Each structure stands twice: as C-alpha cells, then as structure tokens.
Amino acid sequence: MPGLTHTLDVARRALMAQQSVLSVIGHNIANANTPGYARQIAHLQAEAPQLWGGRQWGNGVTLAAITQRRTQLLDQRLRAELSGLGGWRMRATVLAGVEELLQEPSERGLGATLDAFFSAWSGLSSNPEDMALRAQVLAQSQVLAERFREMDGRMERVGREVGAQIDIELAAFNEKLAAIESVSRQIAAAEQGGGRANDLRDRRAQWLDELSEVADLQWSEGPGGAWTLRAGGRVVLDQSGARPLRRSDLNGAVSGGSLGGLLELQAEGLPALRERLDLLARDLIAQVNALHRAGPSQSDFFSGGGAGDMAVSATIAHDLTALNVSTSGLEGENDIALAIGQLRESRIIDRLGMTPGEYWSAFTGRVGTLAGEARFQAENAEWTAAAAQAARDAQQGVSLDEELAAMVSTQNAYLAAARVFDIASQMMDTLLRI
Amino acid sequence: MRVSTGTLHQTTLQHLRASQARLARLQSQIASGRRIERPSDDAAGTIQGMGARGALRARAQWSSNLVLARQHAQATETSLGAAADMVAEARLLATRADASQSAEAMAALARQVDGLLAGLLDEANRAQDGARLFGGSDTRGAPVEALRDEAGRMTGVTAASRAPEGRLLRQVGEGTLLGVNTSAEEAFGPGLELLTHLIALRDALEAGDAAAAAELQPLLDRDLERVAVAQAVGGVLARRLDHLEERLAQEEMRLEAARSQFEDLDIAQAVMDYQEEQTVLEAALTLSGRLLELTLARYLQ
C-alpha cells in the first residue's frame, strides 16, 4: 500500500495540473477579444498507476496536452466569404464614386446639359436672326463639350485611382505573404520538438483571413506541416519560400478579394463605361457636324473625336457668323438649327438605336445597376461572412461564461487537492509526533 | 450551440449597424425630399425619372418657341387687320368717285388713296423684332420695294424677297413643326396686285376717270377677300397654337407627376418608416445593453 508520501505526491500533481488548467483559462480569457484566436483546451489525464501489493494504485492527474478546436472546413468557408466580401466592397466603393460624378438624377448632370444644348438650337431656330441666340448656342455647346471632357477626365482619374489602389493592395498582399512565410517557419521550428504552436498558428490563421479579403486563396497543409498557399491557382508560398506577386502576374491570376474586384474594374468595368460615354460624344459630334457642314461656312461645328477632346471648333468659337443656321444662309431660314434641335428626339446614338437622352438615361441606369448590385452584394457578403465567422467562433471562439464556469470548477478542484495535501500533511505530523 | 462572447458582440453590433444605416438613409431621403438620391437607389426608376425630366425640358423649350410663334402670328394678324381696313377704305373712296365730282374732289380722293398706298406698303414691309412678316424666309430685307417717279410718287411695286415662298417653321411639340408666316402673295396677291390696284385707283382718280375707278371696285373686293382669307388662316393658326399650348401644359403636368412619382419621396410614409426604425433601434439598444451585461462574471464573488 502506498504511503502518505504518495498521497502528498498525488495532491501535489493535482495542484499543479489545476494550476495549468487555470493558466490556460486565463490565457483564453485574456484573448477573448483577440481576432483569430482559437480557444485552447487543457486536457487532463490520470497518471499511469503503480502496482503495490498486487493492486493498481492511482498516481493522480497530469496535463496531457493543450489543444485547439480548429476545423479547416470552417476556415476555408470563412475565407471564401471574406474574399467575396473584399471584392464586392471594393467594387461598391469605386462604383459609388462613378455614380457621384454623374450627378444624376438632377439638373446638374449631363442629361440637363444635353437638353440645354438642344434647347439652345431649338430657340435659335425660333428666332434665327438673333445674334444673341447664336451666342447662346455657342455658350451651351462649349458647356456641353466641357462637361463631356470633364466627365471623361474624371472617369480616367477613377481608373488611375483604381490602378494606384491595386499597387497598394499588392504591396500589402506581398508584405503579409512575407509575414506568413516567417510565422510558418517559426511554427515548423516550434513543433519540431512535438506539440502544437497554437498561438503562432492563430496568428498565421488570422493573417490568412486578412489576406483572403485581398485575394482568393487556397491554403493547404499536408502531413509533416508542409504548406502551400495559392492565389488564383498560382503558388505564392510553399516550403521553398514566398513568391511575391508582381503587377505583371496579376492578370488572370487573381479573381477574388479586393484585388480581384479592382482588377476586374480596371480591365472591364471602367473602360466599358468610359467607352460608352465616348460613344455618345462620338455619335453626337458626327451627327451635329454632318448637319452643320451643309451650311455656307461648310465647317464642322465640333472638333475632336470623342468625349476626351470634344470642343466647339475654333472657327465658330472665334466667329459667330461661321455658325450655320440654315443651308442657304438667309437670315430667316433655320433648317440646320431646326434639324440640330430635333436631334433631341432622333435615334442617332449607338447605331441609330436611341435618342441622346435615352442613351444617357440608359448609361446612368447601367451605372446605377452595377453600383446597386455591388452594394447589395457587399451587404449580403457582410452577413454571410458574419455567419461564417459565427459558425467558426461557435467552435473555436472564447465564451467568457464557459471559461468562468471552468475557472470555478478548477478552483474547486484546486481547493480540494489542497485540502488533501493539508490532511495528508497533518497525518504526517501526527505520525512524526508519535 | 456554443455562442462565443465575440459572436455575441459582433452579431449585436452588426444588427445595430444595419439599423443605423437604414435610419441614416431615411434621414437623408427626408432631408432631400427625394426617394432616388443616386442611380443605384432604383436604377429603373432613375431611367424613368430622367426620361420625364428630359421630356419636361424639351417641353419648356417648345413652350418658349410657341410664345414666339404666337407673337409672330399676332403681329401678322394686326398687320393684316390694318391692311384690310385700308383696302376697305380705298374701296369706299373708289365708290365715291363718279363723273359728278369736281377735278379737285377727285384729286383729294387720289391723295387719300396715295396715303393708304403708303400705309399698305408699310404693312407689307412690317417687321416683328427685326424680322419681316411677309418676306417668306428672307426676313431681313424689305419684301416689297416701291418704284417711284421723279416726283417720288409710287408708280409700281416689285417683290424683293429672295425666298418669298419660304415657310418660317417653328418646333412647338414632339415632331410638330408649324409654319407661322403668311407670304406677301397670300396677303397681297400674285405680283402684289393689291398694291398695283391701289396705284391704278390713285392714277384713275388723279386723271378724273370715274369709269376706270369703278372698274377697279370688284378687283378691290377680291383683294379684300384675300386679306380676309389670310386673316382667317391666321385665326386657325392662333387656335392651333392655343390647342398646342394647352396640350403642352397638360403634358407638363403629367410628366411632372410621373417624375415626382419616380423620384420624390412619400414624406408621410418615410416619416412613419423613420419612427418605426427608430423604435426598433431603441429596442435593440436596450436589449443589447441588457444582454451584454448578462455574464457570469457579475455573479461571481
């Protein structure tokens, strides 16, 4: 039969084990609000028994392991949602900026300027002898051309801002990639001697979460801790080291996350919108010039070939008499002014499909649809990412109530073990006093 | 299901943020009075609203064109009225000429006719805001030039307009073009015969030829009838302009109602929605506060 020394030893182990549990609980409580932290669990197990007098005697308790509950499936689901969120949020931000520059629906947008242009010509056709109305046509035409140029310039600027943001996101991506590489090596080194580097793994997982908002990632960890990180199918990190993405690598390599959203806007979304704006300007210039050239001055009314360089021709800007109101040049005739004024109702834009006003409304509607869809998807993605986060936290998040309950339980076990120690110690004293 | 402390906080915050975002949007809409503040609020509604705005702007211009067309028509009507009065007076003077009149009396009648002739020439060359009324689409120069002898007496007239048949077309509606002018020929006859008839009458009176003056009376009746027809055509144009103005006004009302329906906010509904959302947010804040306070830590000593 084991003696009192054995009992004291069992109590000592119990005190140490509960103290370890309390330490893990304290660690969990300390990190209750730490992003990416996965709750740690101290696993106790009974010490191997000893054989005395033909019986197995228990040796108390010991701390077997400190583990985490982390499921790769939930990590991947969350990262996929974060990737979608990053992309839609970036699209929503950029497209909201494009919406702002349209200033529609209002009396300050291009729609009102187009109408003012046609109204000026229509007004001139009603009073073709009036030189003041010619000056009004010139002024409205200059405003229209300036509006086109300004809008084209602003859209180009949005494109440049997107390009600059791509560089920023790319730099942040590569910086985080280097950090993930570094922490992965630390994990490998720490786990060489056995056990799991829980906190370092948490840090890496958190960085992978953050990186997922920038690009679509596939993380895999094979047996023996071999890891591979892919962005859009391209390996950007493995055992041999990080392979930072360069600007030239991006096309087709990244499709999700904020980087993917920006790349899509830069490659397709913004150029397509700018091209549509340009088409309106091009067709309008062509139609107005064709009508205007039939007059005595035989000059083009607009110079330039599109939204970016549209202007009233220098000839007309410097000499109002070169502005053709009629083909004959008679002061009371107004066929050219009337025809240009009537372009408002003519299907002259986009292969004779729409009136200028309809085309501009459709353009605005398209921007609105794209921006609204991006905003809607971003809001949805926030909820789905939050749901994925909640699902992961349900497994690995810290619940303070749970930790406090465990703390009380641990405290009780510690008190009881201490009591055992105290009694055994008193018994030892009694024995020694004999 | 386990609910972590972080999830509890995050879920609460997310719902509060969503509620605050809805409140902020309603607040902005109420402040601006607009349901559509940017195209993405309702892309289809934006297209419809912009269509209505464009149509309203076009109608504003057509209304303005219509005002100018009416001014032109009114000036023409006034001028034709004056011409009709003068022709009628000339016709009356022609009836007074008979063989019993003395040479002086006939000369006096001739002077009166000459005065009417000058008045008619003025009307034929009348301008409205610098544009000749009867010059066809050549509105700058005088459409009728008088030929005079050495003494300055009018001996004939000639049409000087380069486009006497030209129509002054004005757009006063979608695809609606109206010719607003009356040509010199429509008012004064082919070759400006009304004026040549008056010259002939004056000459007959000066010569004391009562028979020649009598022969001119039916011609003057025809001239008077032609002016009356031109006045009647002007009346038709005026009624058409009235009708078009009324139609434009009705269309403006309909389009403004459509624009408002698409773009403007139903303030009463929005205020109710705002109050409802505010109540929801207040309840959520109260409950969230209580929920987040519920922790074992408060009960452990």
Image (tube, coloured by chain):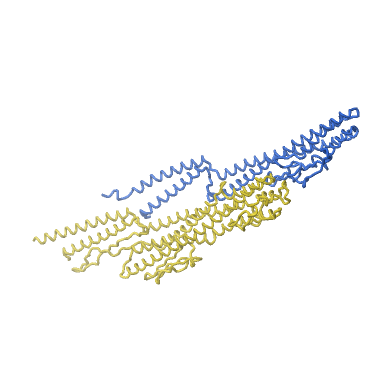
Chain colours: A yellow, B blue
Depth check, front residue: A148 or A273: A148
Residue drawn at 33 percent across, 48 percent down? B294
> B108 above or below A233?
above
Query: Left of A176 or right of it: where is A53?
Result: left
Query: Left of B153 or right of it: where is A196?
Result: left
Quadrant where the image shows the N terminus of chain B = bottom left
> A4 above or below B221?
below
- Residue furthest to the left: A434
> B155 above or below A66?
above
- Residue furthest to the bottom: A240
> A230 above or below B51?
below
Depth check, front residue: A180 or B63: B63
Depth check, front residue: A34 or A53: A34
Answer whether residue B194 is visible to the viewer in this image. Answer: no
Q: Position of residue A146 (x, y in %)?
A: 58, 52
Q: Position of residue A27 (x, y in %)?
A: 30, 58
Q: Position of residue A254 (x, y in %)?
A: 48, 64
Answer whether residue B120 is visible to the viewer in this image. Answer: yes
Residue drawn at 75 percent across, 44 percent down? B141
**Number of marks in picture:** 0
Residue drawn at 35 percent across, 49 percent down? B292
Q: Position of residue B273 (x, y in %)?
A: 48, 42
Query: Left of B264 or right of it: where is A398?
Result: left
